Amino acid sequence: MRLLFIRHGDPDYEKDSVTEKGAREIGLLADRLVNENIAAAYVSPLGRAQVTAQATLSRIGLAGTTCDWMREFDGTVTMPQTGEKHIFWDFLPSFLEKYPALYSPESWQGVPFVRESDVPQKYAAVCKGLDGVLAAHGYVRQGRHYAVTCANRDTLAFFCHFGVTCVMLSHLFGLSPVPLLHHFAAAPSSVTTVYTEERREGVALFRAAALGDTSHLYAAKEPPSFSARFCEVYDSDERHD
């Protein structure tokens, strides 16, 4: 089985839709995806993901399933030093260095300010939702692997957001979400491709073949959007916060 995690086009957050550039991006994305033989599609309820999905699904005649658990991951923590609420996917390096356990698959949820927040509950909801979809398509979670109840080569498309994609990938790969959220970036309209590997009959793992691929934009000479990244060098007018 193949999973495609697709980020929405360049976002207009105020309108919860996409910008004019985003509209061009999702058109090019649709040109790419119409040939991918998508068997089923799952879509975040947020507008920017819905419009992105519709650009493709309307062309292939497929109805997507809207899943509330696929909305952007918005878990927050109370910062130890300031007592202020802070989004979980945006910590500065100086903060991360104080809490190395955040990088541990076994320990990250036990860090006090994480344990006392809504992050573990929201993380569990995403994992449960993803595992429900995979089970319906023949792959049932058992510990760190998946039992294969119906081996297949179907392609599932998930139209959603960067943060929740990192959460899903961390669950599939047995990782803390922190390194994915803070050290990877998937540009708007990008495609992350993950395959099952059934090297022993009935036992599957997932392996990423591409993360944040925007080749459909390069082919059309449409530059990727900057969203999901921060300034490349400090002395610039690019996003710092």
Image (cartoon, rainbow, N blue to C red):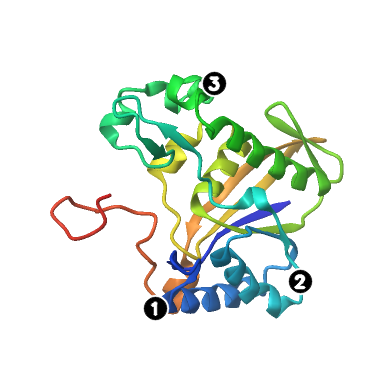
The secondary structure type at the circle numbered 2 is: loop
Q: Is residue 78 visible?
A: yes
Q: Amino acid at mark 2?
A: Leu
Q: Residues within 10 Å of mark 1 (few under 14, many from 20)?
A: few
Disc with the residue nearer the chain's start (2 vs 3): 2
On the image, the x and y values in percent for residue 59 come to: 69, 80
Determine the residue positioned at 55% across, 72% down: 29
Cα distance in 3D space between marks 2 and 3: 39 Å
The secondary structure type at the circle numbered 3 is: loop
The quarter of the displayed image where residue 84 is located:
top left
What label sits on residue 106 in the rendered view? 3
Q: Which residue is mark 1?
A: 221
**Residue 43 vertical position relative to residue 76 in the rendered view, above or below:** below
**Residue 229 vertical position relative to residue 50 in the rendered view, above or below:** above
On the image, the x and y values in percent for residue 83 come to: 34, 29
Q: Amino acid at mark 3?
A: Glu
**Residue 82 vertical position relative to residue 60 in the rendered view, above or below:** above
Q: Amino acid at mark 1?
A: Lys
Cα distance in 3D space between marks 1 and 2: 28 Å
Q: Which residue is mark 2?
A: 62
